[in-house]
Amino acid sequence: MNVRRVTAVASKEWREIVRDRMFLALTFLVPVSLMLVVGYGLSLDVEDIPLAIVDRDGTNLSREYAYRYIDSRYFDFKGYALDVHDLSPLLADNKIRAAIILPENFQKELLGGRPVVVQTLIDGTFPFRAQTTKGYVLAMNTSFSSEVLASYISKRRGIPLAQAATSIRPVTLEARYLYNQSMKSDWAITPRLIMVILMMTPPFYTALGIVREKERGSIYNIYSSTVTRLEFLIGKLIPYVGISSANAVILWLIATQLFGAPFKGSLLFFIPATLLYIICTTGLGLVVSVLVRTQVAAMVVTFIVTVIPSILYSGVIVPISSLSPTAQMTAHGLPAMYYTNIIVGTFMKGVGLRELWPDVLVLAFYATGLMTIGYRMFHKRPST
Amino acid sequence: MNPTTPTTGERPQPHTADEPETRPRRGRAFVVWWNRMRVMTIKEYLQLYRDRILIVFMLYAFTLEVFLAGSGVSMQLQNGALQVHDSDHSFASRELIHRFRPPQFSIDGEVLHHGESIEMLDRGEAMMVLDIPPQFQESLLAGETTSVQLQIDTSNPVLGFLATSYGEQIVGQYGLEAAMQREGIGLNEQAAPIIHEEHRVWYNANQNDAWFMSVVEMLNVITMFAILLPASAMAREKERGTVEQLLVSPLSTFQMMFPKVLAMTSVILVGTMITIHLILQPFFGVPFRGSLTLFMAVTAIYVFTTAGIGMLLATIARNLAQVGMLTALIFIPMVFLSGAWTPPENMPPVLRAVSAIAPLHHYIDASLGIMLKGSGIGLLWDSILAIALFGAAIYGMSMGYFRRQFG
């Protein structure tokens, strides 16, 4: 391998990038704006669920119950409905996502020490939101029932209300939130977005860079030159790895400084691990570029192999543990998941190489594997 | 196929002398216009057809990709890995532990030391650790208040929330039952002032994630191709210089752009039909409570509109690499902020406004409405109108820009 030839290829590539000013601008603009837009916009908190209430009882207690929902920040009260039949058009038109139906004799039964049934209608179109809504309603009901029950016991047995309240809740659950104490999703999302963006953009640059030469025919200059395959590929990839690394630094700064995500781990571990991941995804671009002939195909293939998996199978939106066995296999077969582990580990848990070495090892394996495949499949003597 | 018939110079022959001359001329002009459109569209089909790898990946995206998304991805807390640290080892503690059951929780094992549990959480091997204090049963029988601790890895806040809410439910219920037993005041589940809830989930009664995931995935795939294919068809002409050939031909701007959109739209619609009939219905049983025709019509309008975004990008960009980057810039925020993952109500006001005009948001609402809710045009006209208006605006912009660029 001749270093001079490598630098020659690299500097040619670099000049080509720099001269296409719009492309150069976009290589930085795309990662940054994706980080900002998605970081600000994507929140997995479910709040302000549009809600309607049907109060068939109309007593003090039923109104008190309804006020729990009206005051809650989780629900956005849209108004009382008179009848259950009024609810279905509202649900169908997305005007409300949930409805509570209080039965007649709500107050009478509860004060008399008998159970009541409160009906909840939930729009199941978005299953995840429906499940969270169910969780909120459950929590509301539990807290309201325990108050009613406490006052019932205190009246019946003549003990103070506070004593009755503790007597029916002998065990409490102390939930300790580790790693993300305030449960803020900004924190959780933005570091992971680094993973998504670095999964997508490096293959894009690389695949387009190589396929562009193929499609324009300028690659024949390389075929006929003394530059070896390895020299060409390394020279070609260096500028793109460089740009992606610069982007990684910018993204890290945005996540920690702008979004205030904590970074508890060590940069000495994080920087090499990130570089390894960039080499990995660049290698993915390399493999795509040897497979296809046109830039259109390069783009489509890159989108399919990077964007969708990095959203679905990386643990950003959908946790790996909730994937089915086949999807878990897909997730384990892609580098995104391992780098997500590294991101979560270094940002939130403050762990390092000692805990995360398996992930680093897998990434290293991927990087060498992808580069080798790319190298093997790239021929200076094309078959057609 | 016929090449475009040469038109200039040939005067149309009137059939009869007294018929006005304009009518056959107009008819002839229409035939020419039609022929040009047809030939240009066929050219696009051919160009697409010859890129075999692209075809293979399109088929993959419309079938397997949707299948994988639908079959594997669930947003619910399932088999949350739970470790137990039981310092009491009593009947009561075992009773409580056994209430953390699948499908939400799966008890993976027992840790003996506190440090061990932290390590498992750090390594991501456990998501939760349930910590039961010593003398748990004693204090419970003595009528004292005690507490158990649940340590939760909340690096994913959604799961963290769900785990807490289920955990509180289980412990609260357990405590209530223990209290009732201890008090022995004749209180039981049936005769206590407790609110029982009965929830009914509409439209997707079994909370089948596959319906949602596979449909949304299909819509994403449609969006991706709808931006990328027409945009790259246009940008390719620019990059290869063949746009100059088109410009010197008698084609109008509309005739240059429209056949690309038409060809790609029809290909995407075919792909959509394949997905519906080969994947959505047979594998996941996604119900079509509304009309399939209406869905395809809405899809056609949507693909047209989105193709307009692609055309606009192609007029801005100078080469395919730029088109690729611009597509990424538009497509990824569209997917993340479409309202499928984040309810629009939770977004910052500026982004909420953007998402209100973004066509994918309306398209998702309309599609899920047709499929799951059985909505008809009466409910969906506003979404459809929003998509169409966006499309009209974007085509106006891109044709204007194109004319200025090359005019």
Image (tube, coloured by chain):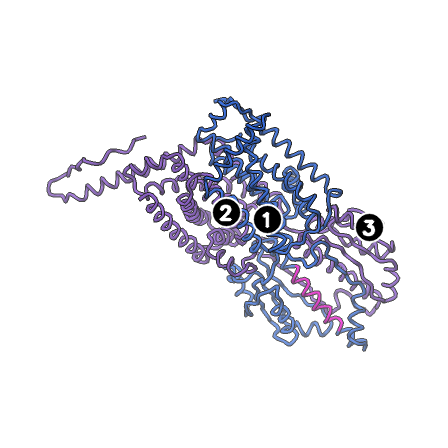
Few, some or many C-alpha atoms within 10 Å of disc 2 (few <14, some 14-19, many ≥20)?
some
Q: Quadrant of residue B255?
A: top left
Please check the rendered image and state whether residue B366 is part of the magenta-colored stretch, yes or no. no
The magenta-colored residue range is: A135-150
Query: Which residue is at the front of the view, B291 or A360?
Result: A360
Question: For numbered disc 1, what is the local secondary structure?
Answer: helix
**Marker disc for residue B329:** 2
Q: Do marks 1 and 2 share a subunit?
A: no
**Where is residue A320 drawn, in percent x and y?**
66, 45
* Callout 3: chain: B
For residue B206, say whether it is visible.
no
User: What chain does badge 2 belong to?
Assistant: B
* Horizontal arrangement in the rendering, residue A171 relative to residue B7 (left or right): right
Q: Nearer the viewer, mark 1 or mark 2?
A: 1
Q: Which residue is mark 1?
A: A251
Q: Amino acid at mark 3?
A: Gly
Residue A141, magenta (yes or no):
yes
Q: Which mark is residue A47?
A: none
Question: In x, y percent, where is residue A184?
Answer: 65, 57
Q: Where does the image place residue B135, in percent across and percent down from the top left?
A: 88, 60
Q: Colour of chain A?
A: blue
Residue type at mark 2 is: Leu
Q: CA distance from mark 1 to mark 2?
A: 15 Å
Q: What secondary structure is marked by label 2?
A: helix
Tag 1: amino acid: Leu
Query: Disc 1 is attached to a residue of which chain?
Result: A
| Residue assigned mark 3 | B115
Query: In the rendered image of this protein, does residue B36 appear above or below residue B99?
Result: above
